[in-house]
Amino acid sequence: MSRAQLDKKPVDVASMFDTVAEKYDVTNDVLSLGQDRLWRRAVVKAVDATPGERVLDIAAGTGTSSEPWADQEIEVVPADFSLGMLRVGRRRRPDMAFTAADAMRLPFADESFDVVTMSFGLRNVADPATALREFLRVTKSGGRLLVCEFSQPVNKAFRTVYTNYLMRALPPVARRTSSNPDSYVYLAESIRAWPPQGELARIIEAAGWQQVGWTNLTGGIVALHHGTKR
Ligand SMILES: C[S@@+](CC[C@H](N)C(=O)[O-])C[C@H]1O[C@@H](n2cnc3c(N)ncnc32)[C@H](O)[C@@H]1O
């Protein structure tokens, strides 16, 4: 893994996702042992969007996180800064309005969405606090935020087993399934370095979001953080 990847320079993060785009969805399913499907269902339930609402799914990648809303005929804008991920997304789902966008400088007007959601993206952003303030800017008053991100298992013994999986088992599996195994070493390192649930909640609050809380999934491997805009 290069130092540039650890530094999360936007240009390096975008090109890393460009290289994994073609096999991204298959690799995800294998490495999460199918858990990603449960996590995605939980996100949709937590967002609870209704027809007439407008959803921004930032860091949407190939659009897998956005399609449940499109399938329910809820307006969703899948946005991402990796042109490779967007290309695969547009091929998979030509009906969705894929948009090139950097989470830290969104090309959307103030107060233009009812919901901003981000699945497995915030951890990769160079400055999450800046992104969270941008999300607040484009959200309507009374609108909501839902961040789905890897987190920290609550049980200590489970945490040890999981960390071993991340650091030892995941890279060799990724070597067999991914087009860029180094990116999955980055995945493991970036999960380990990411703040636990309470700390992330404080970062979200400091960005101006209210009623911030979270729900753990799979024992805390993933956490869904929510907030509302006053
Ligand atoms: C792990 S993928 C998640 C994709 C999708 N949300 C999902 O759940 O499958 C992370 C995505 O975040 C995008 N990303 C990272 N930093 C970003 C930023 N600053 N702005 C926009 N997209 C970003 C990457 O290009 C990548 O497509």
Image (cartoon, rainbow, N blue to C red):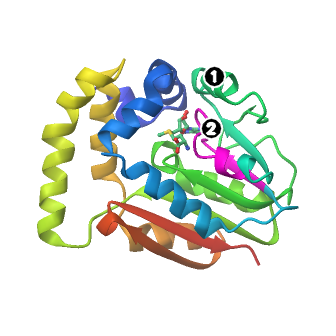
Would you call the spot at circle 2 few (<14 residues within 10 Å), some (14-19), or many (20 or more)?
many
Residue beneath disc 2: 63
Where residue 104 appears, x then y in whole percent? Answer: 65, 45
The quadrant holding residue 147 is bottom right
**SS for dot 1:** helix
Mark 1 within 8 Å of ligand 1, using the beta carbon: no
Q: Which residue is mark 1?
A: 83
* Residue plotted at (34% across, 44% down): 190
Quadrant containing the C terminus is: bottom right
Residue 110: x %, y % from top left: 86, 56
User: As rendered, which of 13 and 179 lies closer to the eye?
Assistant: 179
Please state if 194 lies on the left or on the right of 65 as rendered. Answer: left
Answer yes or no: disc 2 within 8 Å of ligand 1.
yes
Count residues near mark 1 (Cα–Cα under 10 Å), then give few for <14, some for 14-19, many for 20+: some
What is the C-alpha distance between the residues marked 1 and 2?
A: 12 Å
Number of the front mark, 1 or 2:
2
Q: Judge whether 132 appears above or below 226 on screen.
A: above
Give x and y (percent) for residue 66.
65, 46
* Region in magenta: 55-69
